[in-house]
Amino acid sequence: MAVRAGATLVMAGDNDDDVTKAKKQLTVSSLGLLLVIVSDLFIRKIFYVTSYSTSAEATVIALDQNEFIRQLVAVTNLLVTFVGPIMMLGIVVGGFLYITSQGDEEKTGLAKKIITNSIIGIVIIYGAFALVSTVISGQF
């Protein structure tokens, strides 16, 4: 799919529809490839502990739950650390745009959209953090 989209992008010329379609196909292909690479990393390094041997009987593959929990907590902490302040900044920027819109419908709509999306992002990020923290601690 990526090769075909790249060839289409090169040969599209002035046809904007074909160029846009090829760019979308390249983006989807790149995201799919990234997903495969990341999933391989997760499976081999995080979820399973492997002990390889020359004989098939001595090779051991086991699920490492402690490492999985550590990585899950690390990812949620990373998200809360970086995305939370960005969403708060989005609320501030949206509020500033709303105040300075001076009744312009387009700017007011943009400001409301930024504020709404920022609040939704905060709820999702901190909700995921609370869910992971609750499940990890075992207190339901």
Image (tube, grey):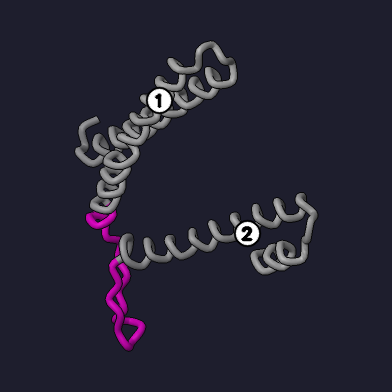
Q: Nearer the viewer, residue 61 or 117?
A: 117
Magenta stretch encompasses residue 117: no
Residue 35 or residue 18, whichever sits in front: 18
Query: Is residue 21 rendered to the left or right of residue 102?
Result: right
Residue 33 percent across, percent down from the top left: 53, 63
Q: CA distance from mark 1 to mark 2?
A: 31 Å
Q: Which residue is mark 1?
A: 119
Vertical placement of 97 versus 82: above or below? above
Task: Identify the residue at image location x=36%, y=83%.
Answer: 56
Q: Secondary structure at mark 1?
A: helix
Residue appearing at x 33%, y 87% in the figure: 55
Q: Quadrant of the N terminus?
A: bottom right
Tag of residue 136 = none
* Disc 2 residue crowd, few under 14, some 14–19, many 20+, Cα 10 Å: some
Front position in the image: 52 or 93: 93
| Residue 26: % across, % down | 62, 59
Label 2 sits on what residue type?
Leu
Q: Quadrant of the C terminus?
A: top left
Q: Quadrant of residue 124?
A: top left
> Residue beneath label 2, please?
26
Instruction: Please state the horizontal and vertical placement of residue 129, each as a whole percent of the image.
Output: 29, 36
- Identify the magenta region: 49-68
Is 19 placed above or below 121 here? below
